Image (cartoon, coloured by chain):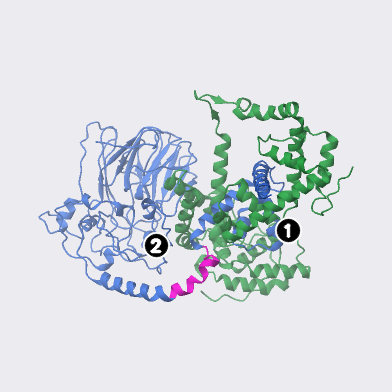
Chain colours: A green, B blue
Amino acid sequence: MNPRPAQPLAAPRAASVQAPVATTAMTAPAAAPASPPVQQTADSLQFPASLADAAERCWRKAAAPADWNVTRDEFRAALERSAAKRFPGAQPYAQKEAGKIEAYLDTLHARDLALAAACSKGSSAAWDCFMAEFRPELYRAARSIVGQASGGDAAARELADSLYADLYGLRESPAGRRKSLLEYFHGRSKLSTWLHAVLSQRHVDEIRRTRATEPLENESGEVITEAEAPGAARLANTASFESQEDPERASYLAALQVAMAAVLGALDSRDRLRLAYYYADDRTLAEIGRLLGEHEATVSRKLDRTRRDVGSRVERWLRDGKKWSEAQVGACLECARGEWPFDLIAHLEPADATDAKRDATAIDSGAGARKI
Amino acid sequence: MALRDQNRNKASADLLRRTLASSAAAAEPCPEPEILAVYSERALGADETARYELHFSQCARCRDQLARIIRAAAPTHPFSRRHRWVWPWTWFVLTPVTAALLFAAALLLRRPVSKPASEQGLVAMQTPNQPPRVDEPGPQDRVQETEQPPSVKPASPPGPSRMRSATGSIRRAAPDYKGAIVSPPRRPAVAPAPRDKELSDSYATDLPLQSRNYTALKKSAKPAPQAPAVQTPGGGVQSGDIEQPRGQSQRVTVEAQAATVTSAEPTQQPLADNSAGNAGGSAAEATPKKARPMFMAAGGAAVGNQMITVEAPLDHSARMLVPSPDPQVLWRISSGRYVEMSVDAGTTWRTQWTSPTAHVVAGSAPSIDTCWLVGRGGIVLLTTDANKWRTLTPPADADFGSVAAVDASSATVTATDGRQFKTSDGGKHWSLAP
């Protein structure tokens, strides 16, 4: 790399608008545009002089090759955008914030950030380096993400290829500037992991969009409306049926639902996430372990402990909060093992509903006393 | 008592399953992909972790994304704790064994290898007085050996570089048009990407980029020719305006017939002819270093014939126009990998699709909304709204040299080996044309 003249990283600069990159006839799309002036936006956080050393360290750590055509100022601007994203509303001249920002800068993946900045700027050398380094990984990741169910190789390739256009920057902002998806990368994670996350988001959203818009069809192939859906009438009528035929069961389930919501809300977020993975998503212990960075045995042990804890808290809530007897609590839990209507809280009397929700706040404190 | 506890535990599990499955959506909006990425790397701070885990516990969408991120990153995951004690010992045992195997493989690879039958076809890519190119693996590796002409005999054993791919493995002998590509890439070799053992064969041929480094080839190659510049709507090639790359001379020989020829006999020129010439046969034009037709696309009714002579590696500034029935609407392929569209007869262009390793060579636009594109590596692209491009499953793992489209559903693609494939349902199903 050619030696560069020393430049103060925190030197003030005039705000300027980047020249739009227009694709016109007889221009080679692969040619790198001229280096535009550094753009200062409202999303940037101008570094004070005290952060100059930290920014310089990042620049040295990035070690961006000369042919990437990314300047010190441009890299600093990327650092400032990253810091602004992490510390929204931070006062750049407050010393305590500067300390946090400096620690934050030291954790960034500087080289990946420099590469992303160069690619979003349109450097062909950087783009070639990006493709050489990440293209095989992108295809492999797309294959892992798509799996076998959704069309296999073709779908994975299409998923990965659809990302290239946005990474390169085929779309234009309203101001006419080419907008690359890499501008949303701020260096907090590795670039490869960020690409995995973007691929995952696209794939999941596509699945959800397809699932949401896919109409139901009956045996003759006619589209069923929402009102005609098999479960709709059942769900709409079950609660009223239950309340008419077995009002006691309805009140049991309603109270149970409130208790569960309160107990789960009081759980540690990690325990709740573990429960959601296991009970809502039906994931295996091994998968949950990978997701949470825990061993399988640890996941199993913690799940068991949390389940027991939830069960005991719910029972305590019903006993102490609702003043139910042991038999009533048992009957309540037994009711829950049958068919569970969608939402019974709406069928509680307003006063009962209010009492139930107020009592829920006392669960974790161990008071359990019901306010009469 | 134990039974009661067991029943209570089961009831708790049922309760949790029902509650969590029907719980309300998260109050906070979903975080950006970067937060998910940082979280999956366990690099979030404690406060952020707690905050976002609460959201994840309430948001099935985020949980689904996280699971896929972890799955995508699975090969690079560190060993779990219970394997940690195995890892150091594994190194002590495997390292010398691996070194010995690599040494043995290196010794084997250094031995001269006889020229395979596939090399016969490579003369098509050679320019006068140019050494052959370094072999690069590609989809055509999958061509079976039985497809080679049985009578072909190699003239002389090629150098090791011709047989060795960028990853160092010996290629299977197969008809390969890239084998004559000259000079190794000047960039330092990039380490091959880790391969997942679970990948299927079809995906396993999607080799790392260093084996298709057209950029490096461009830097080391002589002035390049240009692919046929213009294709008539519905197929066929016209020798017409050819955009000259800046500062480079080129020579392209294009022969075309009218697209409306109805009784054209398919003409097949398999590579065996060139192969025989290379083997020292009596063919007058059979010299290894003479430029030869790369391929011939045969066609029947309403399909244009084309014979293209390519003499040098791809020129990145080369462009090819694909006109539509409306002279105002044009598509343009730049460098084989950028697809651009103009609605004002070429005054302005808008890039619609790009892929850094694509090599699109031909197109056909039967209407102002529909355009079919084909190219090397089995690439088949289609747009039916003049905006969004779809990558279709190719009919075969082959290089395609031309396409003739009737409408958005019906088209015929022709491989460089002469095979023709037809579709009438927009590329969902293909049939081999007789």
x, y percent for residue A78: 63, 63
Magenta stretch holds residue B296: no
- Mark 1 crowd level (few <14, some 14–19, many ≥20, 10 Å Cα): few
Name the residue: 46% across, 61% down: A128
Q: How far, Cα to Cα, is label 1 from label 2?
A: 41 Å
Residue topped by disc 1: A88
| In-image side of A64 versus B261 (left or right) | right
Chain letter of the residue beneath label 2 in the structure image = B
Residue type highlighted by circle 2:
Gln
Residue closest to the far right: A372
Q: Secondary structure at mark 2?
A: helix
The mark found on residue B383 in the picture is: none
Q: Secondary structure at mark 1?
A: loop
Residue type highlighted by circle 1:
Pro
Name the residue: 88% across, 45% down: A371
Query: Quick check: can you spot residue A17?
Result: no
Segment tinted magenta in the rendering: B77-91
x, y percent for residue A64: 54, 69
Task: Report the quarter where the C terminus of chain A lies.
Answer: top right
Chain letter of the residue beneath label 1 in the structure image = A
Residue closest to the far left: B282
Residue closest to the far front: B1
Residue topped by disc 2: B210
x, y percent for residue B281: 11, 56
Above or below, B392 against A44 in this view is: above
Name the residue: 26% across, 63% down: B132
Query: Quick check: can you spot residue B140?
Result: yes
Magenta stretch holds residue B85: yes
Contact flag, marks 1 and 2 (Cβ < 8 Å): no
| In-image side of A23 versus B17 (left or right) | left
x, y percent for residue A232: 64, 29
Closer to the camera in the image, A339 or A55: A339
